[in-house]
Amino acid sequence: MATFISNSPAESRALGRRLAADAGAGSVLALQGELGSGKTLFTKGFVAGMGSKAAVSSPTFTIVHEYRDGRLPVYHFDFFRVKDRQSLARLGLDDYFFGDGVSVIEWADRFAEFIPEQARWIAFEIRSKNQRAITFQGT
């Protein structure tokens, strides 16, 4: 486990951008943390690091946004408003998780049983108005 302390939104985006350099097809990032902890900011950096020019926003109401203009497609999920296991099961997650792109899942801990074993868990914690602790679990 490793923790990165971000002192600004720009640092959180930069961390996401750096992580994108190592991402390959089938990579899954499982993000957890309270509202406002930096999950979407990190994802904006990650998508940009994949070479996408897309304007990234949280897919809270659509559940998934697809960004296909980078070196690999990025599938950005938000499980916050998912009501139950049946709703999530209908999304065909395996097609995303084991397909040609990278999956980034906000609020992944709400339905951890759907997250593949190879996922990289990243926890976001608010330390102050601008400071966040971003903890990488596992490999």
Image: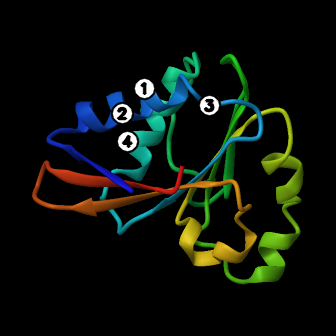
Q: For mark 2, does the 10 Å Cα neighbourhood hold few (<14), some (14 to 19), or many (20 or more) residues?
A: many
Q: Are marks 1 and 2 in contact (CB under 8 Å)?
A: yes
Alpha carbon distance from label 1 to label 3: 10 Å
Q: Residue 91's quadrant in the figure?
A: bottom right
Residue for badge 4? 41
- Does residue 80 appear in this view? no
The CA distance from mark 4 to mark 1 is 13 Å
- What's the distance in space between the residues labelled 4 and 3, CA to CA? 18 Å
Disc 2 versus disc 3: distance between alpha carbons?
Answer: 13 Å
Give the distance between the C-alpha atoms of the residues marked 2 and 4, in whole angstroms: 10 Å
Residue under label 1 = 18
Question: CB atoms at circles 2 and 3 under 8 Å apart?
Answer: no
Q: Where is mark 3, residue-wise?
A: 23
Task: Say the numbered circle drawn on residue 78.
Answer: none
Q: Quadrant of residue 1?
A: bottom left
Instruction: Pick whichever, 137 or 100, lies toward us.
Output: 137
Residue 112 lies, in percent from the top left, at: 64, 74
Q: Position of residue 139 (x, y in %)?
A: 54, 49
Whether pointer 4 and pointer 3 mark residues with C-beta atoms closer than 8 Å, the reply is no
